[in-house]
């Protein structure tokens, strides 16, 4: 079971995605980029995938990923969510457009996560 960190400034989106993904994945949520940085740093070796909104107050999803990649000197497995199709996204990144269907997100996760990812224990703290 993979561990997924979901970041969005809309609590209803976090609740929906936690419910949708929680059957197959360990899901940790964060309401902004600063909170996500702290969680990722705490669980860096346990988080398999970051699913983040691009447009958020304070720190965008693009900035969050850039900071994480600078800290860990590697590309982070990420799916960007956005309602704005004109935002510049680095080629090769996975993007799902809001609103999206559960199938679209699950298909994106299957494309991004390595096949046969090792099961992870659920984090004991930091979950919502």
Image (spheres, rainbow, N blue to C red):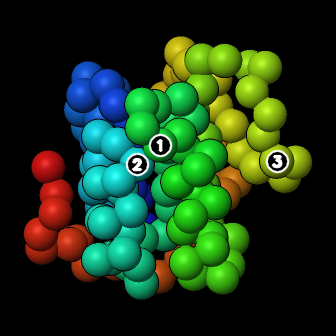
Residue density around tag 2, few if under 14, some if 14–19, many if 20 or more, within 10 Å: many
Vertical side of 88 occupied by 68: above or below: below
Quarter-of-image position of residue 8: top left
Q: Is residue 95 left or right of residue 44?
A: right
Q: Position of residue 123 (x, y in %)?
A: 20, 72
Name which residue lies at 75% across and 27% down: 87
- Whether pointer 1 and pointer 2 mark residues with C-beta atoms closer than 8 Å, the reply is yes
Say which label, 3 or 1, has the lower sequence index: 1
- In this view of the protein, which residue sits in the foreground, 121 or 96? 96
- How far separated are the C-alphas under marks 3 and 1? 17 Å
Q: Give me the disc on residue 59.
A: 1
- Whether pointer 3 and pointer 1 mark residues with C-beta atoms closer than 8 Å, the reply is no
Between disc 3 and disc 1, the foreground one is 1
Q: Position of residue 125 (x, y in %)?
A: 12, 69
Q: Position of residue 59 (x, y in %)?
A: 47, 43
Secondary structure at badge 3 equals loop
Say which label, 2 or 3, has the lower sequence index: 2
The residue wearing badge 3 is 90
Q: Give me the disc on residue 123.
A: none
Quarter-of-image position of residue 106: top right
Vertical side of 18 occupied by 45: above or below: below
Secondary structure at badge 2 equals helix
- In this view of the protein, which residue sits in the foreground, 45 or 18? 45
- In this view of the protein, which residue sits in the foreground, 72 or 20? 72
Q: Position of residue 77 (x, y in %)?
A: 61, 63
Between disc 2 and disc 3, the foreground one is 2
Asked whether residue 88 is in view, the answer is yes
Name which residue lies at 29% across and 48% down: 30
The residue wearing badge 2 is 33
Q: Is residue 22 left or right of residue 2?
A: left
Secondary structure at badge 1 equals loop
């Amino acid at each position: 079971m993979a561990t997924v960190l979901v970041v969005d400034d809309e609590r209803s989106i976090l609740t929906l995605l936690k419910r949708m993904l929680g059957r197959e994945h360990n899901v940790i949520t964060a309401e902004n980029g600063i909170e996500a940085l702290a969680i990722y740093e705490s669980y860096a070796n346990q988080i398999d995938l970051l699913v983040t909104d691009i447009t958020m107050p304070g720190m965008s999803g693009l900035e969050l990923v850039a900071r994480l990649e600078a800290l860990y000197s590697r590309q982070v497995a990420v799916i960007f969510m956005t309602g704005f199709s004109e935002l510049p996204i680095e080629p090769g990144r996975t993007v799902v457009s809001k609103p999206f269907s559960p199938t679209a997100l699950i298909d994106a996760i299957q494309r991004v996560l390595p096949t046969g990812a090792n099961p992870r224990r659920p984090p004991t703290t930091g979950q919502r």
